[in-house]
């Protein structure tokens, strides 16, 4: 007779997070940059801290990378409780800082060889140049690289020690759309290989496209967290209708659609449940008012809407 059925792996034992913080705090004088945040990052996932400029994202990652000492809070990294992140943990981390600068008169490959010397074991420079799409620039001087190419070189340096956990602070800022896509593909490939990626960004499309889990942060606090799908799912079966609207016409729109209308600069926005009915009502209202409703757009809610609903502000203001 066989024994009791073995539970599927992971079903009853919660997967241990690769990183967990509790009540993390850091102030600069009177500024509470990080004001008591807690979260956990599961291994093999892409985790994003999403927030506007000054939210406290960089301060948080710099603490987790061992570059800053927190005022208070607990950090558990690679299953071990640490007072601060030290050399033993750093050897297993990869870090892409917001502003990475390399010696301008070194060649691209030389930069990788130089940084590789810091590690007892490292990936081959050629492999990394291929991964970040810089192979044909291997002999180019750093000073001749574009901003986006420098960013990709910094990413190759971050991958040199084959890190288990990779911190990327705004990895695609300054990249053109093609280079951004290439970086996204690379991050998803790293995740498929079992790496964990910790991303900070203020591009909500980036967080939405890549993340398994998103923490939305503002003024040093976490306002909401969840998978992108769960976060936008909070709106329920809602559709947004957007169109050009002179601000002077907004009060009339709000009067016709009480509780559903929002003004966003020169755009009007309606949150609707019954699209066919409300679109028809909107079109007849516009006709009465003599408005053209240029650039009309019907779309599903996104993380920007979640942030706006939580704070009354846009992420990129
Ligand atoms: P960004 O998206 O602009 O990089 P962020 O979310 O990364 O912003 P932080 O750089 O962590 O935010 O900054 C959080 C707050 O702490 C801001 O008000 C910032 O001005 C302040 N701050 C950050 N670093 C310092 C510092 N070294 N000294 C004083 N204040 C600082």
Image (cartoon, helix red, strand yellow):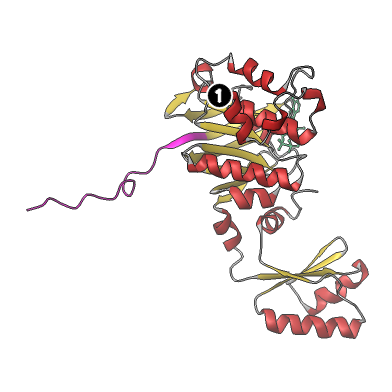
User: Which of these two is toward me, 28 or 162?
Assistant: 162
Please tell me whether mark 1 sits on a helix, a strand or a loop: loop
Q: Quadrant of ligand 1?
A: top right
Residue at horizontal 75%, vertical 17%?
A: 106
- Observer able to see residue 32: no
Secondary structure mostly taken by the magenta-highlighted segment of the chain: loop
- Residue identified by numbered label 1: 124
Q: Place residue 50 in its image quadrant.
A: top right
Residue 309 placed where, x, y %? 69, 58
Residue 220 placed where, x, y %? 67, 38
Residue 155 placed where, x, y %? 65, 31
Q: Residue furthest left?
A: 1
User: Which of these two is toward me, 166 or 69?
Assistant: 166
Question: Left or right: where does residue 280 sit relative to residue 244?
Answer: left
Q: Which residues are magenta?
A: 1-21
User: Which of these two is toward me, 35 or 178?
Assistant: 178
| Local crowd size for mark 1, using a 10 Å CA cut-off: few (<14), some (14–19), many (≥20) | few
- 95 over 38 or under it: above or below: above
Question: Left or right: where does residue 233 sit relative to residue 10?
Answer: right
Residue at horizontal 88%, vertical 63%?
A: 266
């Amino acid at each position: 007779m066989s024994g009791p059925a073995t539970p599927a792996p992971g079903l009853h034992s919660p997967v241990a997070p690769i990183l967990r913080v509790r009540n993390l705090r850091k102030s600069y004088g009177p500024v509470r940059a990080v004001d008591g945040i807690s979260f956990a990052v599961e291994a093999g996932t892409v985790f994003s801290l999403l927030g506007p400029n000054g939210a406290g994202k960089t301060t948080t990652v710099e603490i987790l990378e061992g570059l800053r000492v927190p005022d208070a809070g607990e950090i558990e990294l690679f299953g071990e409780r640490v007072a601060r992140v030290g050399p033993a943990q750093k050897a297993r981390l990869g870090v892409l800082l917001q502003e990475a600068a390399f010696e301008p008169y070194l060649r691209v490959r030389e930069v990788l060889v130089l940084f590789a010397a810091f590690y007892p074991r490292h990936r081959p420079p050629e492999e990394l140049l291929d991964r970040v799409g810089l192979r044909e620039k291997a002999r180019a001087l750093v000073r001749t690289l574009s901003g986006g190419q420098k960013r990709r070189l910094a990413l190759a340096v971050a991958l040199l020690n084959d890190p288990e956990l990779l911190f990327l602070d705004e990895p695609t800022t300054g990249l053109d759309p093609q280079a951004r896509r290439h970086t996204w593909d690379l991050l998803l490939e790293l995740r498929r290989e079992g790496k964990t990626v910790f991303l900070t960004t203020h591009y909500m499309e980036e967080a939405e496209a890549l993340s398994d889990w998103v923490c939305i942060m503002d003024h040093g606090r976490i306002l909401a967290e969840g998978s992108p799908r769960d976060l936008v799912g909070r709106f329920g079966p809602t559709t947004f209708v957007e169109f050009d609207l002179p601000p002077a016409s907004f009060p009339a729109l709000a009067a016709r659609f009480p509780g559903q209308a929002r003004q966003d600069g020169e755009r009007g926005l309606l949150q609707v449940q019954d699209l066919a009915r409300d679109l028809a009502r909107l079109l007849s209202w516009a006709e009465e008012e003599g408005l053209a409703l240029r650039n009309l757009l019907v779309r599903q809610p996104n993380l920007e809407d979640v942030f706006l609903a939580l704070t009354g502000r846009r992420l990129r203001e």
